[in-house]
Every structure is written in C-alpha cells, then in structure tokens.
Amino acid sequence: METRVVFHIDFDYFYAQCEETRSPELKSKPVCVCVFSDRGGDSGAIATANYTARKYGVKSGIPISFAKKRLEERKDAVFLPVDFDFYSDMSEKAMKVMSDSANIFEYVGRDEAYLDVTQRVSGDFKNASHLAQQIKNTIRDKIKLSCSIGISPNKLISKIASDFQKPDGLTLVLPEKVEEFLEPLKIRTIPGIGKKTETKFLEMKLETISDLKKLDIFTLNKNFGRKTGTYIYNAARGIDNEPVKKREARIQYSKIVTLKEDSKNYEFLSENILELCKEVHNIVIKNNQMFKSVGIHFVQSDLSNKSKSKMLKSPTSSIEKLKKTAEQLLKEALENQTSTIRRLGVKVSELSEIQGQSDITSYF
Ligand code: DCP
Ligand code: CA
Ligand code: CA
C-alpha cells in the first residue's frame, strides 16, 4: 500500500474560543462555557474552558459550582451558556476551508475532521507541512479561530499528534518516526483507552506505550477480546489502516417508508413510526450523535406533504425519548387528518456529538 498523508485537525478550546471571537474583550479573562441544567442556579456542567481558566483546574465535564470555586480569586471570570447554533456556524465556515484543501474530507464533529491529502501533496510530508500551515493561516485570518493539526501516515497517529502541542500546534510525525513518537507517551493517549483500561494496565505496571509493547497479541486478546486486543496491539505500534472516509457535516438523519397500504389509522401508523425510530436511532448512535429536535413527515395519498416537529428541552440520544416524541407528534398530526397517508418518515436534527465516550468499551 502506498504511504498516505493524513491530517487530523482539531479546534482549540472550541466553544470558549468561539465566544472569544464574538467578544474579543474576553480574551484576557478566564472563560467557561456552561451547560446549565433545568434545575436552575449553578447546577450543570462545564462544556469547555479557555486556557486561562484551565490553569485553575477548570475542564470539560466538571460541575459549574466546582469551576466557580476554583476561579474564586478571579473576579473577572466569565461563565457563559452554550450557544450551539453559533458554534455550528463557525464550524461550518472553517470546515469549508478544510474540505477545499483535501482529496478526501471526513467530518468527525463540530470541532474536528480528518483529511486525506496524499494526492494533493504528492505523498510528500514537507509539502504537507506547508499545506497544513496554509490551512491554519486561512482559518485564523478568515474565521479568527486557531486549531491544532497532526500530520502522519494514518488517522490514529494524526489524532494523537494534533493533541500533542495544543493550542495552535502543528505536529508532523514522519512514517519512519511513528514508533519513536509513540513510545514515551502514556497508554491513555491511545484513542479509545479510557480510565478503566488504563487502570488495568497500571495494575500490570505498564504505563507508557513502550511498556505496552511488552504484551504479545495473545495476552491482549485474552484480556480484551480479539477485536479490542488487536486494536491495542496495532495501535501501540502505530499501525492503523482505517481509510479517511468521505463524510460531510450532517444536519439531520431521517428514514422514510412507503406503507403497505394508505392509512390514517393511529395503531397502524404508530407501529411503522416505532420501526422508523429504531432505524434512525441506530444511525444516530453509530455516528456518536445526540439530537434536540424530532420530526415526522407524511406523504399523503394525493402526494402532498405534511410535517411536524418538536424541539426537546435538551439534547438526548435516548430511543425512548425519540419514540415518545414521534408518537406524540403522530397523535397530534392525526387529530384533523382528512387524507390517508402513503409514506411516513421520522427525522432527528439539531445534532451534537456525544462527549466523553472515550472508554474502549463504548468505542467499538
Ligand atoms: N465538549 C463538551 N463536553 C465535554 C467535552 C467537550 O461539551 N465533556 C464540547 C466543548 C468543546 C468541544 O466539545 O469545546 C470540543 O471538545 P474537545 O475535547 O476537542 O475540547 P476543546 O476543543 O474544548 O479543547 P482542546 O483545546 O483541548 O481541543
Ligand atoms: Ca478541540
Ligand atoms: Ca475534539
């Protein structure tokens, strides 16, 4: 197989940086972006914080009240509610710059993407560094965002490399330097290895990737199962053949069926709705997403269209919530339905990525 040139691009302290771009006076202050829960007050969690706030121990996932305590001495600290629409707009613009520079562009989430640029740079890593620097400059000049880029022959190493010199980093790992780059790193650096797996290795006195290489494939498979064991074995050696797959940013997922017969009977339609919910939910989970809006869609017997949707209180990935909302919409839609229905659809939108799914058990 020819040597590939793969970028992983990740925006720095993304939500908080978007807020700084909108209000530059925030730049000198600790900035925390908060997901307030509907219980009111300070209940809820920190989505992210800028690097000034991080110096005080504020990070993604901790309760807002902890963050406030840690920043007590900083009277200028700012706590802002999340504004997903604004971050999506910023993301969309920056993603455009990236996808214009790639041979294959794979959207991962609002704040990161993989690019296969092998052809674009004629397989040359020096050209690749220049291209990466250009992308960084353009995104900084046009969109006022900084990002970090990892360059290597595969997705795994590029993902690790983009995180290596954050913020505003550019890390190149040449094919012949891959193992050298990995060896001193903590095992936890391997994507998919979470706290639980790390603890298991620490109990075996294994801390770095270099230590991890002492385990043979049989031991790993015995402990983690063949799929995960093989993944860890290869990852420790920098081996990853996953292609960069073309994927654009999605704004919704939907499924539609043509019914066995035209109908406006609630029981019959509801059965179909629940089946569609299952299918939509499968795609959503496979893509590691949550949704905040649920919609149903009718194509009526005269082929006219009708749709109805509902915004939820907070993003969710729950199938029960999806089913319940879709059934409720169906009930409401049928209240004054005269025409029978020929095709029926379910969609979810207002998507966001599920965060904190970094444990290997949830990774596969
Ligand atoms: N996020 C979240 N909850 C989490 C983790 C992240 O809501 N537990 C959101 C906020 C982040 C965005 O996702 O801005 C991207 O997550 P990253 O892990 O890439 O972290 P940041 O971009 O915030 O920081 P870094 O500079 O480390 O990339
Ligand atoms: Ca980021
Ligand atoms: Ca990220």
Image: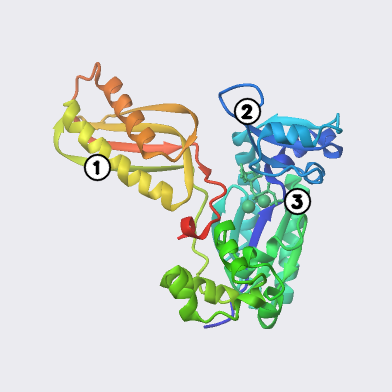
Residue 2 x, y percent position in the rendering: 55, 82
Tell me the amino acid under the disc marked 3. Answer: Ser
Mark 2 element type: loop
Identify the disc placed on residue 146: 3
Q: Nearer the viewer, residue 222 or 111?
A: 222
| Disc sitting over residue 316 in the figure | none
Of tags 2 and 1, the one toward the viewer is 2
Q: Position of residue 64 (x, y in %)?
A: 68, 33
Does mark 1's beta carbon lie closer than 8 Å to ligand 1? no
Mark 3 and mark 2: Cα distance apart in space: 30 Å
Which image quarter holds the C terminus?
Answer: bottom left
Residue 327 versus residue 128 in the image, above or below: above
Q: Residue at x 63, y 63 (%)?
A: 188
Q: State the mark number for residue 257.
A: 1
User: Do the CB atoms of the residues marked 3 and 2 lie less than 8 Å apart?
Assistant: no
The answer to whether residue 354 is above or below residue 1 is above
Q: Nearer the viewer, residue 46 or 200?
A: 200
- Residue 92: image quadrant is top right
| Circle 3 SS class | loop
Q: Residue at x 81, y 37 (%)?
A: 30
For disc 2, the marked residue is 43
Residue 240 seen by the camera: no
Residue toward you, 229 or 206 = 206
Q: How is the image coloured?
A: rainbow
Residue 285: x, y in percent? 42, 49
When the figure is inspected, residue 242 is found, relative to residue 70, above or below; the finding is below
In x, y percent, where is residue 69? 77, 33
